[in-house]
């Protein structure tokens, strides 16, 4: 039985690691003359209670009013849930933006290009490449995530990932 579980882990783990969110930066607006530093403790605790978030930065970037979070299992969290957690924190804050760096496979659906992530496909906007996505290649994409009415990533950076 242990051997079966080990083999299953060795077979499944590489596939789950193929596509993943590498970093998320949240832009947060607050209704405070002191900026993000004063209500950060309350906002951070609200984000830590979110079931899709593993870690939240100890301190925010006060100058840019942003903070880094790490999603659980490399999966893209639901931005609406993050927004609700921040608003419901009672800190007088709202989610301004979500910047995501994710690695995955590009797929073409008609004239649209999407990034395949675990359990989601995200439409890419502002992407001039590639003519035909190659399923054997991995891509790292960074951009601002929009979530109404569908998930759309406004591409800022785009690069092919070197495979070992």
Image: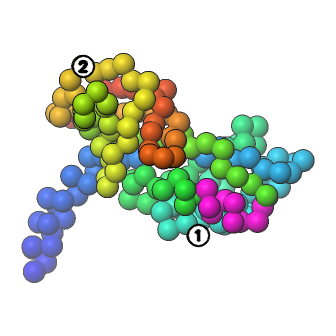
**What residue is disc 2 on?**
131
Residue 72 on the magenta segment: no
| 41, above or below 105, in the image | below
| 110, above or below 9, in the image | above
Residue 77: give x, y in percent of width and height.
47, 56
Q: Residue at x 59, y 65 (%)?
A: 48
**What residue is disc 1 on?**
49
Color scheme of the displayed model: rainbow
Q: Nearer the viewer, residue 125 or 85?
A: 125
Q: Quadrant of the N terminus?
A: bottom left
Q: Nearer the viewer, residue 36 or 113?
A: 113
SS of the residue under disc 2: loop
- The residue range painted magenta reads 83-91
| 133, above or below 120, in the image | above
Q: Residue at x 31, y 30 (%)?
A: 112
Dot 1 crowding, Cα within 10 Å, few <14, some 14–19, many 20+: few
């Amino acid at each position: 039985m242990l051997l079966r579980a080990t083999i299953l882990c060795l077979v499944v783990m590489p596939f789950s690691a193929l596509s993943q969110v590498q970093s998320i930066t949240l832009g947060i607006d607050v209704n405070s003359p002191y900026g993000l530093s004063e209500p950060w403790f309350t906002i951070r605790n609200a984000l830590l209670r979110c079931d899709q978030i593993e870690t939240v930065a100890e301190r925010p970037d006060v100058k840019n009013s942003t903070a880094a979070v790490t999603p659980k299992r490399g999966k893209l969290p639901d931005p609406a849930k993050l927004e609700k957690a921040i608003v419901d924190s009672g800190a007088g804050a709202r989610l301004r933006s979500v910047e995501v760096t994710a690695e995955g496979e590009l797929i073409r659906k008609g004239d649209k290009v999407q990034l395949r992530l675990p359990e989601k496909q995200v439409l890419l906007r502002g992407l001039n490449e590639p003519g035909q996505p190659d399923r054997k290649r991995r891509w790292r994409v960074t951009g601002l995530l929009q979530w109404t009415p569908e998930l759309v990533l406004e591409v800022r950076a785009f690069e092919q990932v070197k495979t070992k």
